[in-house]
């Protein structure tokens, strides 16, 4: 009989899925604005711009609300887990064995840090673009390049994340953790040997 251990709290899972939902809405509306063929197909550019802007505001507001109203102590523990980067993490990224990992492996830590940084950069650059359309003092050189560049890098990270979460046989078991909160205890022991579940 399979034994499961808790890996992610309800707050962590809610934060993950709120981030995913917001990102997909922003990606879809952003691509309509960015790609001329989609822009022509959809039309209503001013409406799509409004959807994109207000979705961005809603995305960041929702993430902040979950962080404030959810299990703050648990999120601080998670931040500490992600922040600890040791020699085993370096070996893991270099593909060397043995490289036992904690609750998050080095790739997950890197993805979490990049996601948080990109969220902030998307928000700041998006606000500058929006304000720049209303007041030329906010038109800064490179803002469009930053916003578009973040989109390209985020797309690459998303493809890699989805591949590991849904397709790759060794890691797709982790998907249960972010949906239901628990993972197979044997899988956890193999892939996260330094982690001691509660």
Image (tube, helix red, strand yellow):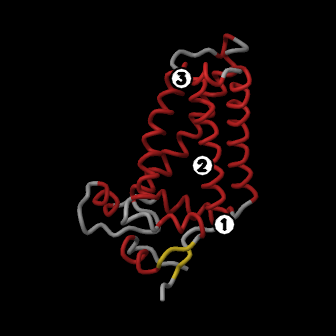
Q: Is residue 82 above or below residue 152?
A: below
The residue where tag 2 is placed is 20
Give me the disc on residue 35: 3
Q: Does residue 113 appear left or right of residue 86 in this picture?
A: right
Which image quadrant: the C terminus?
bottom right
- Say which of 79 and 147 sits in front: 147
Q: Residues within 10 Å of mark 1 (few under 14, many from 20)?
A: some
First-in-chain label (3 vs 2):
2
Q: Residue 157: x percent and y percent?
A: 44, 44
Residue at horizontal 60 percent and vertical 49 percent from the top: 20
Say what secondary structure mark 3 lies in. loop
Marks 3 and 2, Cα distance to the nearest angstrom? 22 Å
- Say which of 174 and 7 sits in front: 174
State the residue lying farthest toward the left: 96
Marks 1 and 3, Cα distance to the nearest angstrom? 37 Å
Q: Does residue 146 appear left or right of residue 139 in this picture?
A: left
């Amino acid at each position: 009989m399979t034994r499961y251990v808790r890996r992610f709290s309800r707050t962590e899972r809610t934060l993950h899925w709120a981030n995913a939902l917001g990102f997909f809405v922003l990606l879809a509306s952003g691509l309509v604005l960015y790609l001329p063929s989609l822009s022509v197909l959809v039309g209503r550019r001013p409406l799509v711009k409004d959807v994109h802007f207000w979705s961005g505001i809603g995305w960041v507001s929702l993430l902040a609300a979950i962080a404030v109203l959810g299990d703050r102590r648990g999120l601080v523990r998670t931040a500490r887990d992600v922040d600890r980067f040791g020699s085993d993490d370096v070996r893991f990224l270099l593909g060397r064995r043995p490289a036992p990992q904690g609750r998050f492996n080095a790739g997950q830590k890197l993805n979490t840090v990049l996601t948080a940084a990109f969220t902030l950069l998307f928000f700041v650059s998006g606000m500058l673009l929006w304000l720049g359309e209303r007041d030329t003092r906010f038109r800064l050189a490179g803002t469009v390049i930053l916003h578009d560049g973040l989109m390209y890098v985020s797309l690459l990270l998303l493809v890699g994340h989805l591949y590991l979460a849904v397709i790759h046989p060794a890691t797709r078991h982790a998907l249960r953790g972010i949906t239901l909160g628990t993972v197979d205890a044997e899988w956890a022991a193999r892939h996260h040997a330094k982690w001691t579940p509660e």
